Amino acid sequence: MRQFPKNKLAQLVVKSCEHFNINTVVISPGSRNAPLIIGFNDAKEIKTLSIVDERCAAFFALGIAQQTRKPVALVCTSGSALLNYYPAIAEAFYSNIPLLIISADRPAHLIDIGDGQTIRQENVFDNHILFNANLGFENDEENIKKAIETAINKKGPVHINVPFNDPLYEIEEVEYTKIEVVEELKESLLDEIPLDVDELQKFATIWNASKKKMVLVGEHFPDELLQIQLEHLVKDPSVIVLTENTANVSDPKFINSIDKLIFPLEEDELEQFQPDILISLGGLIVSKKIKEHLRKFKPTHHWHTDSKRAFDTFHCLKHHFKISPQLFFSQFFFLTKPTKSHYQDYWLQKKEFRLNKHQEFISTCAFSDLKVFGKLLPSIPNNSQLQLSNSSVIRYSQLFNINKTLSVYCNRGTSGIDGSTSTAIGAAFSAKENTVFITGDISFFYDSNALWNNYIPSNFRIIVINNGGGGIFRFIPGPKDSNALDYFETPHNLTAEHLCKMHQFEYIIAKNEEELDNQLSNFYEASKLPKLLEIFTPREENDQILKAYFNNLKE
């Protein structure tokens, strides 16, 4: 026997999730969502997790879905609770991560009459959602089915809004019957429709006639086939492959620190760097320099390959191949041939020169954010998962070579700082490998409720680089020269010590290079509690050291 809510809509939602193998549900407490809580709690095949803060709950679910590539359901009560999901929904929308938002609502006759915790919930996420299912009308079963199928097939967030009348807590005992589960959908190149070969030949002809070809890889899940294909691409001397750390591909012939290469270039060299053809793939790009460069020195042809969408990031997109990069290259390679060119060789020599200058500077520079990254990134154990927060952290990481055994993630869909810690915890909960999360102080304190979580594994490691404010605003043009720097940088004297005591983290501190070396020597060892290392760097010196670093890269 199982306890089931008497409410028929709640029964329908729970059974539909079981049918489609939605096996993880993150619930935030409330009263209006009681029928859903009761139903999911007694579903034998569903793991239910409780996170109080809805914003943290949504990013936690996003972290799980990031790793499993399967929809994770979120359940909340009515009213403002639902709106706290929005930052994570926007991130999921732009990062192609499947989330199933299930909100309890009041019936239509109770909206806008002055009742508490009532807002206009129908279609509230309309600009950043793939499908809305507003229940309580007609075709409820069909709408739920379409919502879940959309989340699975199109990889993104969907919203099911469920109005409940009182009473909310009534249950009925029913005989347990195992729900027939839809076989899990597996991504496969065989499921995609190949491109027309004659049409593709036109693009291959342009490719074969070009001597400067650039492939730019944005955020991407680790993929062995794509790695092999990109390695094949650089056998052509007219091709350079630019990657970001979140691309999760690596090769000595790839250019992985884009800003390090471009920043010192003079105008004539920037023109020389301009490609005839740009093929872009993967998610959004971190490097501001490559975006500025390709918007000014536009390629003659920009093609993007992705089965879902193409952003005109460089204002010159000519064609969108609506298939996965893996299938595109599988077809394209049969039509292409290497082209004589010095393009790749020239820029790989530049890359090597920059790397030598980089190592020279890092070895002697003063203790700072930059120096800390030079220590942290090599210290992370092989085969770990590295989660990065946004702003300065992701940008500093782009200047360094990262161990190719690591898988690297960051919320680059909207690039917000708001849920980085919660996402990393969700990923750590779901992942098999050890998870290390590097964050800045503002991002960490902003999302401090992330630690209010009963599912944090003991092998989870947080590294907070505390420079006493939003350090990036001392580096980017504008804020430092204004009369309002404090409003951009928000200086503070906060530490993570008492948060760690409250949430049962082992707290470790480092204030100089020697202390950091000592703490890193055993930071990743097994422990009963998760650990947080807080590193204090000089707020008023970090930007000067970083500017000196970039000046040092020049020839």
Image: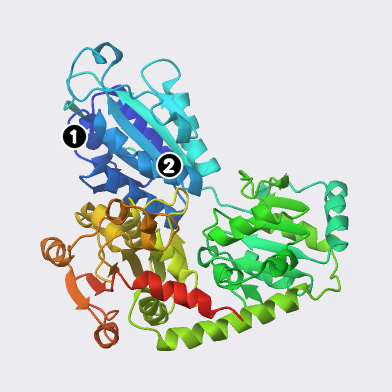
Q: CA distance from mark 2 to mark 1?
A: 24 Å
Front-most of 309 and 143?
Answer: 309
Mark 1 or mark 2, which is nearer the start of the sequence?
1
- Residue 538: x and y, percent? 28, 73
Q: State which quadrant residue 31 falls in.
A: top left
> What amino acid does circle 1 point to?
Gly
Instruction: Identify the image quadrant of the C terminus.
Output: bottom right
- Residue 239: x and y, percent? 75, 69
Q: Which mark is residue 30?
A: 1
Q: Is residue 227 left or right of residue 382?
A: right
Q: Which mark is residue 90?
A: 2
Q: State which quadrant residue 375 falls in.
A: bottom left
Q: Is residue 426 visible?
A: yes
Q: Is residue 107 left or right of residue 224?
A: left
Q: Nearer the viewer, mark 2 or mark 1?
A: 2
In the figure, 4 relative to 293: above or below?
A: above
Q: Secondary structure at mark 1?
A: loop
Front-most of 13 and 443?
Answer: 443
Instruction: Identify the image quadrant of the N terminus.
Output: top left
Q: Which mark is residue 329?
A: none
